[in-house]
Amino acid sequence: MRLSPRHILLVDLLKGLSITLKTLFKKPVTVEYPRKRVQLYASFRGRHALVRDPVTGDARCVACLKCSQVCPSRCISIKFEDDPEKGVRKLISYVIEALRCIYCGYCEEVCPVGAIVLTEWFEYSQSTREAFLFDKERLLQNWDAFVKTFEGKVYTNKFWNLRGVPESLKPVFKREGIDVKLRGEAS
Amino acid sequence: MPERKLQYKEELFSTEDPFFTPFEIQMGPQHPSTHGVLKLRLVLEGERIVDCEPEIGFLHRGLEKLAESMSYTQVLPLTDRLDYISAMNNNTGYALAVERLLGIEPPPRGKFLRTMVCELARVASHLLWLATHALDIGAMTVFLYCFREREKILDFFEDICGARLTVSYPKIGGVRLDVEMGTLERIYDFLPEMEKRLEEYEGLLSENRIWLERTRGVGVISAEEAIAYGLTGPSLRGSGVEYDVRKHFPYDAYPDLDFEVPIGKNGDIYDRYLCRLKEMRQSLRIVKQCIEKMPSGPVCAENSPDLDMLISKRAPVAMAKGEIAFIGFPFERVNLVPFGELYSAVEGAKGELGFYIVSDGTGKPYRLHIRAPSFVHISALPKLAKGHFLADLVSIIGTLDIVMGECDR
Amino acid sequence: MTEGLLKEIFENFNQEIFEVGEFRGQLYLILKDRNSIKPLMRFLKERSFNHLQTLTAVDYSQLGRSYRFEVVYQLYSISNRCALRVRVPLKEEENIESIVEEYPSANFFEREVFDLFGIRFTGHPDLKRILLPASWKGHPLRKDYPLEPEEKPEDFLSLKEFKEILATHGIK
């Protein structure tokens, strides 16, 4: 094998070099970030946001504590109190420690009213660790910032699916999505 | 040339030899070639390795202890982080173990989707293995070419479930989301392109004289020794043993699919490399069959446990009022798990990934033990590396395909 | 083939086996005495059970049984396609023989069981901690070892507690 013509003429090395030469003239696959951005697919699990209700303008959360119980890394802390006149719960504080989050998407899948979502926003680095404690106002601001880049009127999420329930029995927001603009706002 | 190589390997090191001056050096946890945080205590004599002792545990996160305090569905995103390069296989392994414990059968579409993403994850893992292995030996072009293809596969994962690396997509009872026709078509169009690229990698490496010199006859292990040391997966099949969990303990859609398992002959690095390349081709063949035979229907079983499954029969007070008031579920909640213990294994990208679950009737696992292939392969490293040069040690670590996330859990 | 193998095991080791059971199609044996593990493993190795799939231990102290630990061996015969599980109950502070001679892959498994449970294997070539640092005290996977430590070091505080501490000093 050592003295065969293929070996002396370096055929195997030239074959490899020819592959590299061919790739030299192909179009490169790099995306020049940050001048050009990569388009993310829908329901990408990025930064958390509390959805603003189009009717009331405030968060849709009803303090059922389901997201807090299902989170595997226990990063959601909720404080609530009972409102005796109307018989509903009032949300006092809602804090997510984004650094503990593992971005599994369980909270947005289990929420019965569609209050917490993981938006397609991934550029949110900060310089201090305290800035990653997202409280309720910060989460609502996250939603507003996301809505500015959202094209379309109605927001839906792939993780809003209920197994076994026919379409007609699903709550309205899971069938049709949530309006992105607040009612009474000039478009 | 080949004769001299055999000569140095057969020499034995005698401690009575007055010129025997070994010295000890640490190949520390921070090293570009150890593929993660692996510490090796090497005893060298010149450039030859006399002894090699691995030290692990730098990435130990206490997964098995954590899993004893969470419900079965909450443990699933934790298993993503075991072999973080091909996360779908870990999730499938865990979901399969819990399904066998609870007696749940996923629907056919769920099985085919799970098989498809597991094989795509296997291709992605082997691409990264080839990239880093070739880079350690010196072929830097292959590194960039493999990552170009891996990006495309990770884009498919992002389309399917929203995350590229830590997916949590297979769940207990099937898969979490359905896949649209557009995505399946794009994956189908990607397959012939990937086969052409595999030919490119073979053209760059398989007949290259430098590659042959560095990988033929290095790191040889015979079939009996390989089984005795617990090797599984492509590391074992390179020595000629036909053991593949997909054929011995069939799961998901593998009984309905037609594929081969490549076997090597000599048990050296070159045979394992050929095994993994052929496995990539077979994985693409499996993905093609999955897409062609994909049935329609639900993707998750009716009686699979909910995300917020109860940990014990006495539900927390906060769950008692609230959510069920305005949504009526027409199916029953499963909140009691049968007593017992079982072991189930899947073919991960590195080898046999096994889960041993002991359940005591509540919604939390009483004991979860993970049999990680990398943990067992590292114990074979001293046997493989004795008598080789220091430069061969890097190739041997690369060929065993070690991921420390899986090894340390 | 598998029935013949199992019958042979039951004939030779009838005294040492406490219970034979099956759960979800998987066969397991529970031994009475921990000293019979080495002859059993040698016997099984000769009968083509050459692949040790896993070796682990379970702490049963929360379930109220007469023994505390149980060491579990899962074996598989590649040529005959037969899987078998062997469980050996141990009380506190009892040792068990190591099977590294028959199955060299048990080396790291036994070190891990010693590290996380504290069960000693006599005859192991190098029994020391593997996943935790050598100076660690305690055995984490035992049920009386807490998940979170009582006194948390400074960098272990969660961010909320840290923010509260900062707020008491007037820093926002």
Image: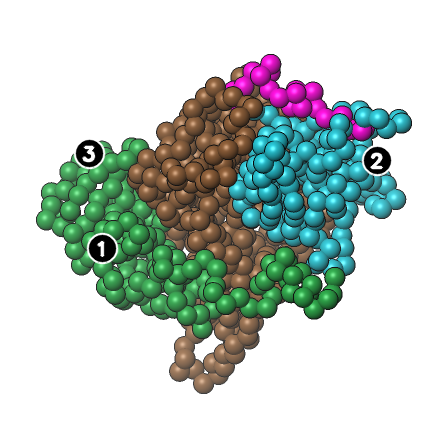
Task: Choose mark 2 or mark 1, whichever is in front.
Answer: 2
Is there CB contact under 8 Å for labels 2 and 1? no
Q: How far separated are the C-alphas under marks 2 and 1?
A: 63 Å
Q: Secondary structure at mark 1?
A: loop
| B272 in the magenta segment | no
Q: Report whether residue A175 is seen.
A: yes
Q: Nearer the viewer, residue A76 or B37?
A: A76
For label 1, the crowd category at 10 Å Cα-Cα, with few meaning under 14, some 14 to 19 and many 20 or more, is some
Which region of the structure is painted magenta?
A163-182
Q: Earlier in the sequence, mark 1 or mark 3?
A: 3
- C147 displayed left or right of C76: right
Is there CB contact under 8 Å for labels 1 and 3? no
Q: Colour of chain A?
A: cyan
Residue assigned mark 3: C3
- Chain of the residue under label 2: A
Give the chain letter for brown: B
Residue assigned mark 2: A148
- Chain of the residue under label 3: C
